[in-house]
Amino acid sequence: MASDHTFQAPTGTRDFYPTDLNRLRYVTEAWRRTSIVHGFDQIDGPTFEHLDLYTVKSGEGIVSELFSFERAGGEKTYALRPEFTPTLARMYAARANALPRPTRWFCTPSFFRAERPQRGRLREFTQWNCDILGDDSVQADAELIACAVESLRALGLSPEHVKVRISHRGAVEQMLTKRGVEPERHAEYFGLLDKVGKISNDAFIEAARKLGMDAPEAVKLLATMAQTTRYEAPTTQVMLHQETPGAPAEYFRALFAALDQLDASEWCVLNLGIVRGLAYYTGMVFEIHEANGAERAIAGGGRYDRLIELFGGPPTPAVGFGMGDVVLSLVLQDRGLMPTDDQIADRLGLRPDAMIFSNGTPEADALVPRVAAALRREGLHARRSAKSTRNVGKLLQDAAKARARFAVIVESDTLATIKDLASGRQEQVPIGEVPPWLRRL
RNA sequence: GUGGCUGUAGCUCAGUUGGUUAGAGCACCGGGUUGUGAUCCCGGGGGUCGCGGGUUCGAGUCCCGUCAGCCACCCCA
């Protein structure tokens, strides 16, 4: 029965046709390989959780940003996962005593947020999460950042394309304390600091004045937060000496030394303007941006040493980041670094090994399925042309379009022609020899 | 939740001051008589002009509403 209306995909979601899914896989496979070689184990959790899991950390205000629901007749309220950290914390807390220290986990699932879609932001997206739990060392911070950097390098990006902007909650708090802001009011200031760049300088100075900071200090604070420089730069050193002497400055020294050893320091800059709106970060925080400031943040993360406790686990230091597919793909496209569909298919190992068709005689026609089955049992990617034509030229064209390595033309019940579509060379082989012949290549 | 811009074939787009059965390129399917691939020639399928209402003798075209997409704001885990 034909429907009297058409259906559309829900707002902010995407249909992934083969080439679309291949492009997504190109990115997620880079994430996966990078994670694995950096010693992370892949995990996953439910696509939906109890709503409470998200309100614990973020408050009731988060509910409007979630897709939440109840079963018909049910009493529990669920929500599609908007992020992974609560699930991660729950999973870690449940087995904390049995897990190695440190534990390194990653995942690349999809997430759901009930926001109005816009450039770089959709309602369903894929996000890579990497976390190191049970390790409070500066080396762990550096390894985590280096892992993110290496994934970008694997996708063809370089320090000219993207920059990791690194800050530290403790350093920013020290700047505030130095200006006479009591610790109880730091949270208010973080909210304000997060708006720098979005509101005018005058608006910032006015807002700071209302929070009790006089204009000259607010101006200096703005200047410090705007500074985005290499760690070795003299201006960086002067800033650290003046603004965050002692422990924070020493932390940055150790972090950048560790990043340097991991060959990642070229990608990194110090920017105390990165505060991130989230309340749960306790130490280093970072964001990865396109170098010219185009697009939204590619990735964000930091240290959250209190969060596992909040979800019922033992006190556990942790550091992690998330990187979404939407912005990253836009940056790759902007920079001309997204390979062609054919290149991606090659890299993902999707090229057919053989396209099989017959010379048009009834006995050859009957053998085509058998040859295909024999090749497939050998683990070869064998396709049959769906063309109804007997025109061998057309069939070869079809094989070339499918980017098959070889065309196999069944000639009789004893003989087949194998044509190498790259070189154009061809030879006749006994039909039983086709699978081993192709397998050798 | 607020605002701006845009909706014609799978894709990119034509379509005259409102006027006959809405077109092109690409893509897709087939043919080019006895078997060799990216060119070429011929043919074919595919569109409730996003949807609904209004004005009009007549609407793809004008008006209103609505839905969707894009972009920005809010927010951004």
Image (cartoon, grey):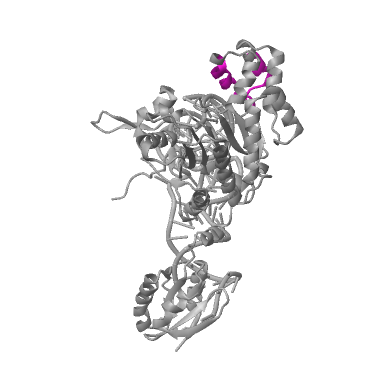
Tell me which segment is drawn in magenta. Answer: A185-206
Decide if residue A259 is on the left or right side of residue A392: right
Quarter-of-image position of residue A220: top right
Q: Give above or below for A38 relative to A188.
A: below
Q: Is residue A194 visible?
A: no
- Residue at position x 53%, y 62% in the image: A346
**Residue A399: x, y in percent?**
49, 71
Q: Nearer the viewer, residue A286 or A108?
A: A286
Quarter-of-image position of residue A114: top left
**Residue A238: x, y in percent?**
74, 27
Magenta stretch: helix, strand or loop mostly: helix
**Residue A124: x, y in percent?**
45, 40
Q: Give above or below for A2 relative to A376.
A: above
Q: Is residue A167 visible?
A: yes
**Residue B58: x, y in percent?**
47, 41
**How many marks can you see?**
0
